[in-house]
Amino acid sequence: MPIVRFYRGDPNAPKPTMGAHLGSNAIITCKGKLLLERRRDSDTWGLIGGGVKNRETEAQAMVREIKEELGIRIPESRLTRLRSYGEPGRIAAFQDGSIWRMVIVVFRLELEEEPDMQISAESKELRFFTKEELKDIEIVVTHSDIIDDWFVNT
């Protein structure tokens, strides 16, 4: 049973019980391939990232999440802010009953070479995908439009 279920624009999605949740995610690419993690909480593939903590900027949160989820350090200056996704129908419903509206700030990070990465406790797998390979995997619904937008605009 998943720990979290994600919704985007679904009229049957549960109504938020909590305030809006600010998160940072990254489009991390290397040689034309996109890095995704297979999440433990939902067994779906998603972008690297997570929630912004108090007293953090979105970019600081992204640097922290990259370190936590991949085991690599990058300077904040390597990130390029792309855009925010915050429409009201972007929802995360957790097993504990909390339901959040999600606002996601997306960054870009281009890597010259595939780094040695360490899988965190939040992930089952880390992998770089071609655009074609993405058709064969289940992507977190709250990230699929972000990924689609990236490939349309590149």
Image (spheres, rainbow, N blue to C red):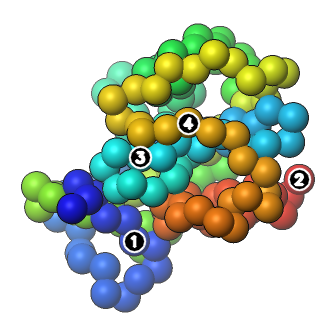
Q: Is residue 10 above or below residue 139?
A: below
Contact check, label 4 and label 2, Cβ < 8 Å: no
Residue designated by label 2: 154
Q: Nearer the viewer, mark 1 or mark 4?
A: 4
> Residue 30 in the image: x percent, y percent?
80, 32
> Residue 63 in the image: x percent, y percent?
54, 21
Q: CA distance from mark 1 to mark 3?
A: 16 Å
Q: CA distance from mark 1 to mark 4?
A: 23 Å
Disc number placed over residue 65 in the picture, else none: none
Q: CA distance from mark 2 to mark 3?
A: 26 Å
Residue designated by label 4: 126
Task: Look at the numbered disc 3 and give the secondary structure of its residue.
Answer: strand
Q: CA distance from mark 2 to mark 1?
A: 26 Å
Residue designated by label 3: 39
Amino acid at dot 2: Thr
Q: Residues within 10 Å of mark 1 (few under 14, many from 20)?
A: some
Q: Nearer the viewer, residue 139 or 105?
A: 139
Disc number placed over residue 7 in the picture, else none: 1
Kindly identify the residue that appears in the image at 70 percent across and 27 percent down: 79
Relative to 90, 53 lies left or right: left
Q: Earlier in the sequence, mark 4 or mark 2?
A: 4
Instruction: Say which quarter of the image contains residue 26.
Output: top right
Q: Is residue 130 above or below residue 134?
A: above
Query: How many marks on residues?
Result: 4
Q: Earlier in the sequence, mark 2 or mark 1?
A: 1
